[in-house]
Image: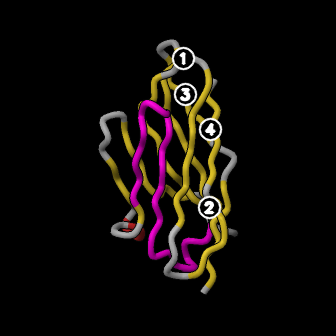
Amino acid sequence: QVQLVESGGGLVQAGGSLRLSCVASGSTFSINLMAWYRQAPGKQRELVATINSGGSTNHRDSVKGRFAISKDSPKNTVYLQMDSLQPEDTAVYYCYCNAVIAGILHDYWGQGTQVTVSS
């Protein structure tokens, strides 16, 4: 099992910044990919950004140039730096991890952290 604990959400004014963190812990595992998703009220959960074991990243078009995903592999931690936040970025942000345990792929989710951007 892998546990994901997110932190860093909060209330910020439009144009402000937040940095989300997600720490993965548990039994022996190897991380293939980590990602951030978000879900706004009344909307489907959407992928925000991914980072794989090699450090390659992808960001959804609406956050490119404003958000940046990164990781600290020795700490099993992934970050999401969010700059120039806009009210439409308001959502619960979820950390996701795809990991290998005993040769089997598993998907794990964090509990979510609320990000609210006021206009």
Residue found at x 45% / y 70%: 83
The question of residue 18 being in magenta is answered with: no
**Residue 106 disc label:** 3
Q: CA distance from mark 3 to mark 4?
A: 13 Å
**Residue 28 disc label:** 1
The residue beneath circle 2 is 39
Q: In x, y percent, where is residue 34?
A: 47, 41
Q: In x, y percent, where is residue 27?
A: 60, 18
Numbered disc 4: secondary structure: strand
- The stretch in magenta equals 68-91
Q: Quadrant of the C terminus?
A: bottom right
Q: Earlier in the sequence, mark 3 or mark 4?
A: 4
Q: Earlier in the sequence, mark 3 or mark 1?
A: 1
Q: CA distance from mark 2 to mark 4?
A: 17 Å
Q: CA distance from mark 1 to mark 4?
A: 14 Å
Q: CA distance from mark 3 to mark 2?
A: 22 Å
Q: Quadrant of residue 32 in the image?
A: top left
**Residue 48 disc label:** none
Give the residue type at disc 3.
His
User: Which of label 2 and label 4 is nearer to you?
Assistant: 4
Give the residue type at disc 1.
Thr
**Residue 4 disc label:** 4
